[in-house]
Image (cartoon, rainbow, N blue to C red):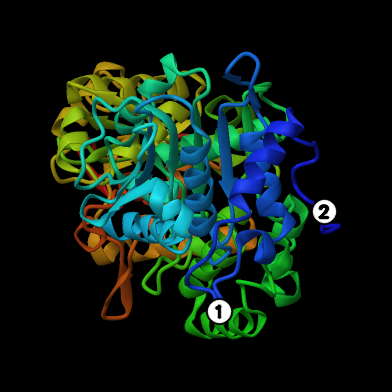
Amino acid sequence: MDGESLIPCPPLFPAEAAEAMDWMKQLRIADVPGQPYIGECTRGWALDFAASIFGAYDPETGRRLITEFFLLISKKNTKSTIAAAIMVTALLRNWRKSAEFLILAPTVEVANNSYQPARDMVKLDPELERLLHVQDHIRTITHRETGATLKVVAADTDAVGGKKATGVLVDELHLFGAKPKAENMFREALGGLASRPEGFVVWLTTQSSDPPAGAFKTKLDYARKVRDGEVNDPRFMPVLYEFPAKMVAEKEYEKVENAWITNPNFGLSVDEVFLTREMQKAKDEGLASFANFCAKHLNVEVGLALRSDRWVGVDHWAAAADKSITLESILNRCEVVVGGIDGGGLDDLLGLAVLGREKGSRRWLLWSKAWAHETVLERRKSEAPRLRDLERAGDLVVVNDMEQAFSEVADILAVVDASGMLAYVGLDPMGVGAQVDALALVGIGGEDDPSPKERVVGISQGWTLNGAIKTAEIKLASGALRHAGQDLMAWAVGNAKTEPKGNAITITKAVAGTAKIDPLMAAFDAVALMSKNPEAPGSVYTADRGLTFF
């Protein structure tokens, strides 16, 4: 906020940093008018970051004391140029014979964007052109004396297995988030560092247009924890250009006069007139466009997928989160509870929603959980990184037998039933046999259910669910529906697409496509039941046995 560098300390070995920076500052930038030296047109933040990398190397022991660097920075702040300059300098400073340096990019296009500045830096300097051999067709630069190479690798076409890299720079890390095998790829690419104590890895990225997932989410979360002091890792240096939490909460990032905070090249490579116009255009084009703009140009993390065909409840979802809500707290705070279940096929998630009505306030409190068969991870590879994230968070259970999932759902509802508050369990009447059987085994529904009313009920889907969808929207907007703030539900809610059907709207799996919404549909089933204002157990209630439709 004071305009100072985010790197508060000088390099560990200042002399080593100074010597390397003398080399780097003499590299020239081809796509800037006048083709200036980097040292002439780069602001201090970039030089500080590079100096920290080179200055972490102890020339006496041959060991680099900080080995991992992470830079999150907004779009158009010369990230790719800085990446090229760092890696060319590393190639020039290297002493190891036949060493390998890699720039790992998610796609061929990004690989070319990373390679071209490095190539041009060599070609603009006659001395470097004599020392370094450039091979465009394989995106490789070779040091003629040491035999060391700098190679730019596109992850979607080039193999990284078997590499023995001394230095690795991963560009546009956020695009690796959707790659199910990204973590294995990184493990292969970084394997050489185990035998190269002078080695390093640099992660460069902007924010993602979608909620962070997979390898990107893992690394971003870790970088934030190190930055915030939650994790003590002196070999990891995170530099994250993000708005302070208070400014995000108050939406101060929506003011163009604050854009410089996450754009350290504001007024240089980031044109103020351009950014101002693009921000206004994005606002005019709608919430989804503006969210994308904020992610790319302001590093504001996308919390939910905000499309034009999104469910209206998305707009109020984040504000309704309450991390104190758990299954246990619902049982302690509520007077009556209903359950909702949806999905359960091998290509679906099985979603469970537990919705309670709080004593006194009569607010609705929602907690959710989901199960997935291993088949989903294989058939929906684009969703696999996200599902693994949810599994690590504890919101999702991956099983190899859906009977196990049905049984675990029943066991959770049996705990609710034991509290004496379970009024009903609602589910899609199509294909519910296995789940109904599992519930009957724990005394919910079926002949052994001691309740005088049939508690397992069918919830008609399609347009007839419109009432529950509208009720959920209204309750969220008014604060009368609070949820546990789980990543599972944020993801499912963001996946939901609406489709008009006469005077109603529908949210269906067919409209959502490959994106999963089963936990949200389970919540709608629960809302449909709670909308009937069920009485707390113990009241006299008569109903016909069998599957009742609401």
Provide residue 268's location: percent of width, then percent of height. 66, 73
Residue found at x 73% / y 51%: 245
Task: Please report the residue visible at 39 percent of the width from the left and 31 percent of the height from the top.
Answer: 146
Residue in view at x 33 percent, y 65 percent: 497
Viewer-side residue, 187 vs 315: 187
Q: Secondary structure at mark 2?
A: loop
Residue 339 visible somewhere in the drawing: no
- Residue 221 rendering spot, x and y as whole percentages: 56, 36
Q: Who is closer to the viewer here, 548 or 439?
A: 439
On the image, numbered disc 2 is attached to which residue?
4
Q: Callout 2, which amino acid?
A: Glu
**Among the two numbered marks 2 and 1 on one chain, the one whose residue lies closer to the N terminus:** 2
Mark 1 Cα-neighbour bin, 10 Å: few <14, some 14–19, many ≥20: few
Q: Please tell me whether residue 550 is drawn above or below residue 464 in the rendered image.
A: above
Where residue 211 appears, as percent x and y from the top left, is 46, 51
Identity, as a three-letter code, of the amino acid under mark 1: Pro
Return the residue at label 1. 33
Q: Helix, strand, or loop for circle 1?
A: loop
322 left or right, relative to 31: right
- Taking the image as shown, residue 376 lies to the left or right of residue 144, namely left
Q: Identify the residue at image location x=59%, y=86%.
A: 277
**Left or right of 23, for residue 6:** right
